[in-house]
Image (tube, grey):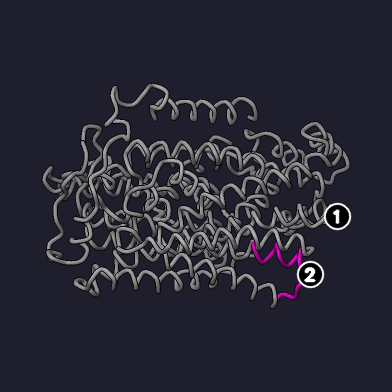
Amino acid sequence: MSALGWSIVIGLNGGIILLGLLKARETHSSVDWFLAARGLPWWIVGLSMFATAVDSGDYVAVTGSAYQQGLPYMSAWWVGMTAGWLAVAYVVFMPMYRAGLFTNSEYLEYRFGPVARVLSVIIQFQSRTNVLANVTFSLYLTFSVLSGWSDQTTWWFVVGIALGAAVYTSTGGLKSVVLTDALQAAVMLIASVVLWWSVWSAVGGWTGLESTLADYVESEKLEANVARAMTHIGSPADAEAPAVLIMIGWVIVMTGYCVINQSQAMRMLAARSVWDLRMAAVAAGTVTIIVMWFNVTLGTLGRAVIPDLQATDKIFPLLVDQFLVPLGGGLTGIVVAGLLAGGISTYDSVGSALAAIFTRDVYARFIVQRADDKHYVRVSRIMTFLAIGISFAYIPFIDGGMVSFYLKLAGVAVIPLLTVYLMGVLTRVHRASGSIGLFVGIGIGLTRFADPLVEAWFDTTLPVWWTNTWWGYVWSVLITALVMLGTSVVLGWAKAEEIKGLTFSRTDPGKVEIPKIAGLEGSWLEKSQRTVPEMPESPFLATAGGTPWYARSSLWTGLLIAAVVMLNFVLFW
């Protein structure tokens, strides 16, 4: 890449990081660090949610996965992510928001006890550090192709990026992170369009893509079902699972991402009103629909350029090298700047989220309960560096496909944990059912990795309807839920006073008082929670006439759902 390209990369991202460091000077307390003083408007929350969910891994890994799976992978983002964001904004996070909680794991102790809280922290650390590893590997692949550096030099460069993100994240917490995320989202959008347009023009648009794929089928370079999957959402290349099952699977796994993921939760819990929280989900969903069109179809366009690439995650940097590098360093710099912006936004988001749940849900809960506010902010800053560093341990395991590796692991613990949250918010299941359901669900998930042992020991294999990733999501939800229901039948259902303010209710106004945790009286956790301000239902309540019709969150939510249905099930099905 040329000097001009590097100037764009460093200038754009360096400026954003500098702004984050300047914003960090406004962080003075734990409420500032963890919840940005609960004063974030909907558009900042929405853009930050998008920038966290769509990272550099979603340039490289998503493009590579679309190259492999085809257009059905679009369902993950158009249907799955939209469903997940709307579910948490309207239902799952409502009890947490109205109770003034800081973390989603914190909710689990109030609802199910300390074991469920700790298990949630462990699962989040596993899941989120896996995502950070995807980001790291994506940056490595891109820079190794475009820079011409040695592997060692490239890795040191990526380590430097991660370290730089950790510095401003640990300094300013959520106040710095959300502002930089919003700016990085704009860079990412520009980068997506630049590369996509170059490849789209070279391939000849949608007609050229279909024609080229048909030629590959005729010359036996490509199987017919794979070629059709490149242009139709309803025709998956995976013959072991029907399109409807894959769609359901994406809704489950993406809703799981939104629910158990503290990096999403801390943004939504920091919204300045319920209206802002819900509109943030609409904003994030809308931007994701636009950007992921470019990212996913870039993978299918890549099939027309290189039909038989074995290392599918390399398709993104190869397309950059083939289509942008010859045009000059400026365009390449914009794309690499967007890739780097996505990576940094995820480093800061996941780093701050994992630091938050370690500090509040482990350290302050079980180790040091009564230190001062500054002490816990300092612990969170240190943990930010450690969380990002831990993610590098995954690198040796993801070379075979980043998205596939993540999906397999998600079926083990993420989906059972999602089920526990949903059952806790929507039903009166017994307090003990959360931990029991989690342990059983995780055990069931682990059995899907036993196929090689079964084949070696018994000369047979487990059925596809059990080992397949998409079927596995359904079994994880059903079995975990049934175990929780069965436990409640045996032990009894939760009493109303035990779950006061902890289940979803459309009539709960303002801040809700919830039962206290015994033994935490006078602790920092209790004191900090009292500092969380009560937020209004809508910023328009103080104005005459209330919320105008054109600003109602239900209207924009309906339009978003209509757009998703039209795009996914009509135009591209």
Tell me the quadrant of the picture where the N terminus can be found. Answer: bottom right
Which residue is rendered at x = 82% and y = 55% of the image? Answer: 328
SS majority, magenta? helix
Residue 72 x %, y %? 62, 39
Please, what secondary structure does the residue beneath circle 1 have? helix
Which residue is label 1 attached to?
A: 326
* Residue 472 visible (yes or no): no
Residues drawn in magenta: 139-151
Whether residue 145 is in magenta: the answer is yes
Please state which amino acid type lies under the numbered disc 2: Gly
Asked which quadrant contains residue 428, the reply is top left
54 left or right of 11 in image? left
- For label 2, the crowd category at 10 Å Cα-Cα, with few meaning under 14, some 14 to 19 and many 20 or more, is few
Residue 126 x %, y %? 45, 64
Which residue is label 2 attached to?
A: 148
523 left or right of 198 in image? left
Asked which quadrant contains residue 293, the reply is top right
Q: Nearer the viewer, mark 1 or mark 2?
A: 1
Please, what secondary structure does the residue beneath circle 2 have? loop
Residue 453 x %, y %? 53, 66
Please state which amino acid type lies under the numbered disc 1: Pro
- Image height check: is 297 above or below 447? above
